[in-house]
Amino acid sequence: MLLHSTKKDWFGNLRGDILAGLVVALALIPEAIAFSIIAGVDPKVGLYASFCIAVVIAFVGGRPGMISAATGAMALLMVTLVKEHGLQYLLAATLLTGVLQIIMGYLKLGSLMSFVSRSVITGFVNALAILIFMAQLPELIDVTWHVYAMTAVGLGIIYLFPLIPVVGKNIPSPLVCILSLTAFAVFVGLDIRTVGDMGDLPSTLPIFLWPEVPLSWETIQIILPYSAALAVVGLLESLMTATIVDDLTDTKSDKNRECKGQGIANIGSGLLGGMAGCAMIGQSVINVKSGGRGRLSTLVAGSVLLVLVVFLNDWVALIPMAALVAVMIMVSIGTFNWGSVRDLKKHPLSTNIVMISTVVVVVWTHNLAYGVFVGVLLASLFFANKVSHFMYIEKSLDAGNKKRVYTIVGQVFFNSADKFIAQFDFKEAVEQVEIDLSRAHFWDITAVHALDMAVVKFRREGASVEVIGLNEASETIVDRFGVYDKPEELEKVLGGH
């Protein structure tokens, strides 16, 4: 079984994975350079990181067909560290980031993705699509008409080439776009911005190195805040991307293995002079849409990237940025969930608020963690409010109008506790009160406290109270924290202490 799944992951889609890997490798180059510039480091730091992370994650990641490399979200978090302490501290922070992510993997934090609602994921995807598009705008501002023409032709190739019988289905259109536009620009001698204009490409292979920082508590204090932020943002983006690729390919991934894999990849990156990275939704979408499905596509992307920038850097430098901009605009359009806009009228208001808030916060702050945190928080609050409305109490009189029976139905927790107490008539002249909890569930200490208060108030009015029907889980929390059935504790409450 293991041999079969391994064979499928690596060799189940040979042609598709190799061609998709080539496309991704070409698209990774300008992004890795751009992210290096954002972080304030030499372009080779981002390129070495992208090579190392992609190659390592191909073997140890939990999601076949997903592309991991240097990313903009991570680069933004490094700016201050690089500015104040330099590259060596960034490499040390990258190693610590990897260690923290491995620990998170063993703590099974990948399972926390189950708490992220579909509306948060949709908002995250839409925000990333907007950010990917916005990142292309500098290449389209204050440029000659040639750039617009090349970009338009590139988009035409990307969307129309697949319509050609046989050939269109077998060769990824983004690859055709990049190669044909590069050939045209070189042949005609167009004076437009190219990959070579973004920064110097490395001319040597990466070498193993240990960060030149003192091994001291002071160093840990400097890098820990950055490493913790990088670890969290990196895992958030990676796990979200894994969920999206799961949907695109209709397959499952191992989120906890992905956490550990990202950690191992970042340690490898730090030891080869690279910066921390994570999964890239844009490149992963390019990979999937170009036919990549297995681990081989990720390995090819990383390996070809290194070959291109080290051994074929003179050729790579000739690629016009307009061709890559066209590819990334295609990614932006393909990534955005257009159905979410149409569904705004159909979906509940709370779902729309969660989705839109996630988009706004991510785009406004350029920080994925903030957006996801706000989305999850709002989704949780809306859920708690919704569940609290499903609690109600049925009332009946027994034994000659001397015994009042309250039957509680629903969930009692912090948001429904006040409603629970408000349902009782403490001034009613009855001798006995029975609180039937057989159709209710108590979730937290606030709920237990509400039950105690109800019992205490009835007893103060002279009624005897019997609580029945607690299920096992509710009984456990009530026995542990409740006082209504503990005489010595109840005396303190009734005595006003």
Image (spheres, rainbow, N blue to C red):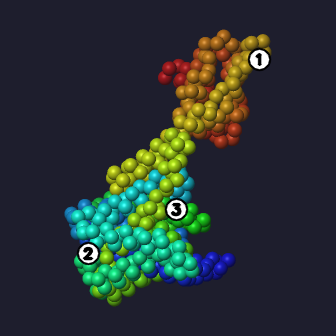
At x 43% / y 70%, what residue is drawn? 156
Q: CA distance from mark 2 to mark 1?
A: 89 Å
Viewer-side residue, 56 vs 14: 14
Number of the label disc, if any, that sits on residue 359: none
Counting from the top left corner in percent of width and height, residue 384 is at 54, 39
- The secondary structure type at the circle numbered 3 is helix
Residue under the point 54% across and 41% down: 348
Q: Is residue 80 above or below residue 485?
A: below
Give coordinates of residue 346: x percent, y percent: 56, 43
Q: Secondary structure at mark 1?
A: strand
Badges 3 and 1: C-beta atoms under 8 Å apart? no
Q: Quadrant of the N terminus?
A: bottom right
Residue that label 1 marks: 398
Residue at the image point whose x is 50% and y is 41% from the top:
350
Determine the residue located farthest toward the right in the rendered image: 399
194 in relation to 331, above or below: below
Amino acid type, callout 1: Asp
Q: Is residue 278 above or below residue 366?
A: below
For the residue marked with disc 3, what is the amino acid? Ile
Q: Where on the picture, by quarter, is residue 142?
A: bottom left
- Kindly identify which residue carries mark 3: 244
Nearer to us in this view, 326 or 224: 326
Q: Nearer the viewer, mark 2 or mark 1?
A: 2
Seen from the viewer's position, the closer of residues 329 and 411 is 329
Write down the residue under mark 2.
192
| Mark 2 / mark 1, whichever is N-terminal | 2
Left or right of 310 on screen, residue 415:
right
